Image (cartoon, rainbow, N blue to C red):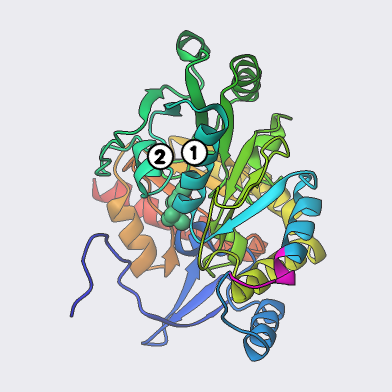
Amino acid sequence: MKTFDVYPLTPITPVKAKGSWLWDNKNEKYLDLYGGHAVISIGHSHPYYVEKISEQLNSIGFYSNSIINPLQEELAYKLGALSGYSDYNLFLCNSGAEANENALKLASFKNERKKIIAFEKSFHGRTSLSVAATNDSSINAEINKTHEIEFLPLNNEEGFLNTIDDSVCAVIIEGIQGVAGIHIPTDSFLELLRKKCDETGAILILDEVQSGYGRSGKFFAHQYAGIKPDLITIAKGMGNGFPIAGVLINPDFKAKYGLLGTTFGGNHLACAAAIAVLDILTSENLIESAFALGVKWMKQLKSIEGIKEVRGMGLMIGIEFDFPIAELKNTLTNEHHVLVGTASNKNVIRLLPALNVKQEEIELFNNALTKSLTKQLQNT
Ligand code: PLP
């Protein structure tokens, strides 16, 4: 049997990883500033993380979700404390798409409506409802026939005001649009969404799958706007690569048996990984440091000639050029051994490093980018 070839892969086979570095099977070393679609939050093979997962594996390693698991309580407690959402409840699952699927389901259970407002260029995953709420022409989004989805331009208050009414089930928005190439909802736009959802009974869902877990310099990107969503979805950095995801649920939503379910969600090993991540974010002050590193890095990037725009918050940064970045990315990978991400906007480099990336690693990237850009501009 062969694997089903449906997405491109970076042509590197890593065999070892430490901090922000990967070593491939030819013993070549690469600086990883993309972290496998933003999943590496506390760095590769962090000793405390490895120790906690190993300990768990040697006690009760794998177990599905049919028996009391005190680690779920510990995870919910620590997540509530660090995120500022102690009063919310936590439903654990396995991926970002699944978290959004469950959030959209909870919303329609609550108000029994079907219309969903999402935003242009959004990405929410690939289960049926989450992909229906995804507005990316490169993704084959078969619209889910059970729900009516309306896509609106991000940050366009008038468009939103003309559409929101008491037939709307939910408004779903990314804390920062990642796949699209780093686009940030304004504070006033998020405040308006909150206000109109309150007035109409629509459920406000913040998809913090990519922008959450400290990446923006706050635990959640929406916390810059000072609003509280009804539901918040999380994944990616939560397990530092171990698959785990969740929905933070406002206490107005009442739990009852059968409402949601999962076999693997919140299993022992996944919880051990997620608790270790929260412990490290706390003990190493990684959220504050992501903020400070991001401010400095974006300022440095803005001074590099040949860049059209730098957008971002904390360590979620988009660098836009006047031309497609494919060649630039190849030069960075092959000649400088630096791994960066792309976006659905082909002119954008996406940086999603581990939150403990070092200043000297950032400078190494800046130099590599400057040299690669000079080479590219000379050749055109
Ligand atoms: N939501 C956002 C904002 C994402 O960026 C992604 C993945 O890139 C998802 C949801 C889907 O997550 P997963 O691939 O874990 O299903």
Q: Residue furthest bottom?
A: 58
Dot 2 lies on which element? loop
Front residue of 197 and 241? 197
In the displayed structure, 204 sits above or below 166; it is below
Q: Which residue is mark 1?
A: 104
Residue at 37% from the left image edge and 49% from the top image edge: 127
Q: Circle 1 sits in a helix, a strand or a loop, which is it?
A: helix
Front disc: 2 or 1 = 1
Quadrant including the C terminus: top left
The crowding category of the residue bearing disc 1, from other C-alpha atoms within 10 Å (few below 14, some 14 to 19, many at least 20), is many
Residue at 36%, 87% in the rendered image = 26
**Residue, x 65% and y 69% (percent of image)?**
271
Q: Which residue is mark 2?
A: 180
Q: Quadrant of residue 58?
A: bottom right
Question: What span is in magenta?
Answer: 66-72
Q: How far across and down, in percent of the image, does residue 88 sit? A: 73, 44
Q: CA distance from mark 2 to mark 1?
A: 21 Å
